Amino acid sequence: MKYKRWIYMAVTCMIIMLGLASRRYGDVLPEFIAAYSGDTLWAAMVYFGLRFLFPNLSIPKTLVISLLFSYCIEASQLYQADWANEVRSTKLGALIFGHGFLWTDLICYTVGVLLSAAVDYCVSSSHTPPQS
């Protein structure tokens, strides 16, 4: 179990690097990928980050929690208080909380979490010994 937890951490770190790269080098990526990969990867990072923090949580529960968390962050962007906008104006605040509500972000979050859960399920089930 300990080994599995660190795999989740490594995957989370790789996703963070890919997400940052998608923002930095978006001008050389196809327009569709540049526009939507960051939010999709952000949600995947949430999923695998939760799997690292709570490795005993089931895949379906992690999926639901990841989606709810991601949707709540997006909904929080509707709140435009001065202090919240100040946080969002920092680089880290923008990466975590975003800037403005977009319906397309909810689609990206859904795709990112569903793909992450599917990969997690496929990898986990391929290492599970068959039941006798």
Image (spheres, rainbow, N blue to C red):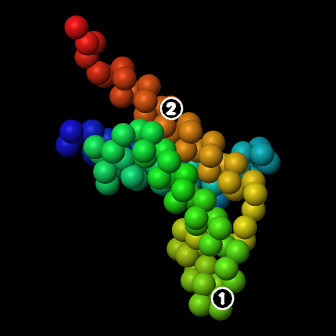
Question: Does residue 7 appear to the left or right of 3 in the view shown?
Answer: right
Residue 65 on image: x %, y %: 47, 52
Q: Secondary structure at mark 1?
A: loop
Residue 106 on image: x %, y %: 68, 54
Mark 2 belongs to which amino acid? Ala
Whole-angstrom CA distance, mark 1 to mark 2, is 37 Å
Residue 123 on image: x %, y %: 40, 27
Task: Tell me what residue is drawn at x 78 percent, y 45 percent.
Answer: 32
Residue 103 appears in the picture as rendered = yes
Task: Tell me what residue is drawn at x 55 percent, y 52 percent.
Answer: 67
Quadrant where the C terminus is found in the figure: top left
Return the residue nearer the eye: 2 or 14. 2
Task: Tell me what residue is drawn at x 69 percent, y 83 percent.
Answer: 80
Residue topped by disc 2: 118
Residue 20 appears in the picture as rendered = no
Crowdedness near tag 2: few (<14), some (14–19) or many (≥20) residues, C-alpha within 10 Å: some
Q: Is residue 130 above or below residue 62?
A: above
Mark 1 belongs to which amino acid? Ala
Residue topped by disc 1: 81
Question: Does residue 12 appear to the left or right of 100 in the view shown?
Answer: left
Residue 131 on image: x %, y %: 25, 12
How many marks can you see? 2
Quadrant where the N terminus is found in the figure: top left
Crowdedness near tag 1: few (<14), some (14–19) or many (≥20) residues, C-alpha within 10 Å: few
Question: Does residue 125 appear to the left or right of 46 in the view shown?
Answer: left
